[in-house]
Image (tube, rainbow, N blue to C red):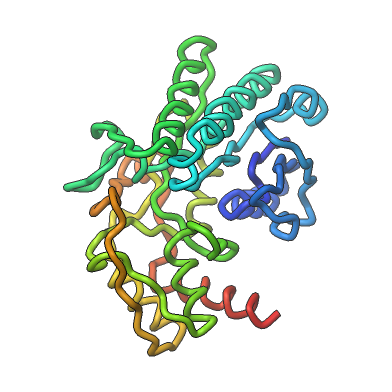
Amino acid sequence: MRVVVTGGAGFIGSHVVDALVARDDDVSVVDSLVTGKRENVSERAMLHVQDIREPVDELFDEIRPEAVFHLAAQADVRVSVEHPVDDAEVNVIGTIRVLEAARRHGAQVVFSSTGGAIYGECLEPAREDSPLHPLSPYGTSKLAGEQYLRMCNRLYGTKHVCLRFGNVYGPRQDPHGEAGVVAIFLGALQSGKQAQIFGEGAQTRDYVYAGDVARATVSAIGQDGGVFNIGTGRETSVVELYELCREAAGSDVEAVHASPRLGELQRSFLDPSRAAAELKFMPMVGLEDGLQATWEWVREKGSG
């Protein structure tokens, strides 16, 4: 297939690109390189440096995609709180531009959304039909993107798919800034520094390996629309996660506890049963193995 991956130079997007080129698809990456990196992009994919906040119609006319994996996003919750207009320009206006460009070619769109930032506090594994309570501009803009996909499906008869990811971790995740906690912990352990745990560390998340997320994303092509949680259904506390990171790194460095962060979710995990039934998706990489693979990448990068 001829496919476009927006955000394909980023953390998750580059893993999706790898999964697509492994199938011998003709892959074009559209990325502004604001947070993405050229070195993340497979040599078998074509990189087009462009911001999705600008029109992409001409580029899509050149590529003529049959499918579009839309992973380009402003994904930092704190940035969204500080700069909600910028967040909306990328996650809402950018998504509309991608949808309109895809529609010119009848291309199905698979949209990367978020679980925790959309569902809010979870007392049990969140299902796709659970109440939606976004607590940040980021979660709200992702939900808006989902609604635009649903609107297109109703108005134009398209079959776009929304995937709500759990906490994705794995190689290529950036430990700088407000990155995923796995990247931050392993980055600290690699440099011999003490990692910070906010509050008591009892807050839980659903950690899902990037390679598994890429497989799930590719499997969504050809589906008849819909929304799917992509996670493990397993919740892991921050304290438990840090201990597993220490085991992977073979480190005895203790974490330091800091003041709790205002408004942070205490429990967030997903029910992935719909994806198992309809996408035939089951996570293959357990947390311990995924952390070990991520640590090996962090260590290799640090010594390179």
Q: Position of residue 3 (x, y in %)?
A: 69, 37
Residue farthest right in this picture:
62
Q: Which residue corresponds to the image point at 52% horizontal and 31% vertical from the top-left? A: 85
Q: Which residue corresponds to the image point at 52% horizontal and 71% vertical from the top-left? A: 294
On the question of residue 222 being in view, the answer is no
Q: Position of residue 215 (x, y in %)?
A: 52, 51
Q: Position of residue 23 (x, y in %)?
A: 67, 49
Quarter of the rendering containing residue 101: top right
On the question of residue 113 being in view, the answer is yes
Quarter of the rendering containing residue 127: top left
* Relative to 114, 28 lies left or right: right
**Residue closest to the eye, 254 or 232:** 254
Q: Position of residue 123 (x, y in %)?
A: 17, 47
Q: Which residue corresponds to the image point at 44% horizontal and 66% vertical from the top-left? A: 182
The answer to whether residue 172 is above or below residue 223 is below
The answer to whether residue 175 is above or below residue 121 is below
Residue farthest top in this picture:
155
Quarter of the rendering containing residue 142: top left
**Residue closest to the eye, 231 or 284:** 231
